[in-house]
Image (cartoon, coloured by chain):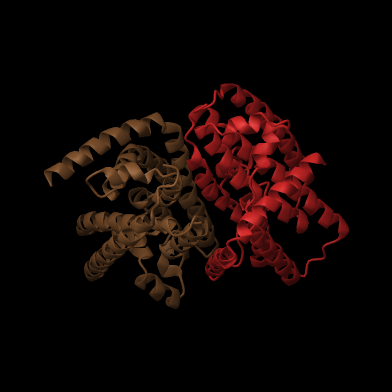
Chain colours: A brown, B red
Amino acid sequence: MRALAQLYLQQFKTTFASMVQYRASLFIWMIGHVLEPLVYLVVWSAVAEGGGGSAGDYTTAEFAGYFIVLMLVENVSYTWIMYEYDYRIREGLLSPALLRPVHPIHADVAENISSKAITLPFMLVVAAVLAAIFHPVMSPRLWAFAAAVPALVLAFLLRFLLEWTLAQAAFWTTRVSAINQSYFVLVLFLSGQVAPLSLFPHAIQVVAYILPFRWMLGFPVELLLGRLTPTGAVVGLGVQVLWVALAYVLMRLVWRAGIRLYSAVGA
Amino acid sequence: MNYLRIFGLYFRIGAMGEMQYRFNFFVNLFQSILQLGMSIGGLAVIFSYTHSLGGWLPDEVLALVGVYTLVGGLIGLVVYPSMEQFIMSVRDGMLDFVLVKPIDAQLLNSLQSVDIWRLIDMGLGVGVLIVALARLGAQVGLSQAALFIGMLLTGSAIIYSFWTILATLSFWFVRVENILEIFRSMYEAGRWPVSLYPPWLRFILSFIVPVAFVTTVPVEALTGRLSPQTLLLGILLAVILLVVSRLFWKLGLRQYSGASA
């Protein structure tokens, strides 16, 4: 345990240094993370304006709150591992990671967290600016904020485990971009990025509640906005734990099967 | 003409490479249909709460999705994979081999890789566009069609130049493959009519990340909404960006000092 903590500390240091080195790419990455929720904020604001100030159970100002919080939660839970893994396996870069006496996922987690530690202050500033422009309305509750802490941690874990596992597809095929794209389209639609899920037809809502995507984004957002009942929050946390456990088992199995196929191209 | 032949050659190489993996056709078909289905599903959800979006009717926005998919397919066909390879080649020094070839390096870099499956997207985009136009009952005359094609070409020139500028950044920053992914979310903004956005955002989407001229303007041309000012502005922007991206490329090339060689 102590060794692992030390490992993380060291990883933080090195990735932090490399992130600062490549700050331009980090900045560009951030633009995209702002633009996407902003677009849907504008779309739904326009819809609400046209519908007499609200659409479904959201008013114009509540849409603003939804998408600004979504942007921040997205910043907590996103990963880019699926883009990188393909390259890593193709170029044989996985080999040195395999020589280390720890599971390679730890280095990726540490890298992910340190990049977010750098971007978070900027994202908070952006959120404040957007709040000044769009005047969001939220009704946060103290207990919901407390419950949002584990919800955010679980959302991060779930998304990381799932995308890390999916990234292993690169062991089997050299053409992962179609898989990645399909995955991202599903996330976009069913996690609550396109619209709050309560605005979808009932059948799609049911599907979204069963699949993991809502639990890595929409659920913590709704919790932070104070739109869930205490029961809803507890049940949600339970579903998150279930999905994290499932994703963990899946990650173990896929990794064990995939690593056998790895032939260290180019090394 | 010579360049067209070279593009044809790369197209054939791309096709031959992919034909080994025939299963990929179905994977890509699935992806394209899923993507389009979600786009249209999103529209359906939005239009279940409203009658028009930024002054556009549902079928007009559908036409926009068609153009969005068509141009997105074009970008994915050649611009995206070529730029990806270019950025990689700056990082590992493979650009040397492009530079020594007796052909303009910028052009070769823009054509050097083809992802043939994106033709599916282009086909689907055209299909959606036709359905949308039929539903609109629009009388598309010869002049409107010509204007549409003209604006589509203008938009493509703009987006190509924008891409070139972004990719050229890799001469300075080396690690810019993020840009490629980020562009996807920027392009996402082009799925909606720009009239929807507040003025400051409309400005950004027209002149800083110029997706407005790529999707909204061609559809405006098709539905007879295009104002002469927008037409001229689009052509002007295309010319300026083409020149600027060329100059920027030359400036960047001076930075390049090889990597491993």
Question: Residue sitting at 30 percent across and 40 percent down?
Answer: A114
Q: Find residue A42 and report its horizontal and vertical position in percent.
A: 51, 53
Quadrant of residue A34 in the image? top left
Furthest-bottom residue in this view: A203
Q: Nearer the viewer, residue B188 or B99?
A: B99
Is residue A222 among the parts visible in the rendering?
no
Furthest-right residue in this view: B142
Does residue B111 appear to the left or right of B177 in the view shown? right
Q: Find residue B67 and report its horizontal and vertical position in percent.
A: 68, 57
The image shows residue B146, relative to residue A190, as above or below, that is above
Image quarter of the N terminus of chain B = top right
The image shows residue A52, relative to residue B202, as above or below, that is below
Does residue B2 appear to the left or right of A69 in the view shown? right
Report how many numbered discs are placed on residues in the image.
0
Question: Residue sitting at 55 percent across and 64 percent down?
Answer: B31
Is residue A9 among the parts visible in the rendering?
yes
Q: Nearer the viewer, residue A107 or B219?
A: A107
Q: Nearer the viewer, residue B137 or A99?
A: A99
Question: Residue sitting at 51 percent across and 52 percent down?
Answer: A39
Does residue B236 appear to the left or right of A186 in the view shown? right
Question: Residue sitting at 52 percent across and 26 percent down?
Answer: B261
Q: Find residue B163 and report its horizontal and vertical position in percent.
A: 61, 40
Quadrant of residue A138 in the image? bottom left
Q: Find residue A117 and report its horizontal and vertical position in percent.
A: 30, 39
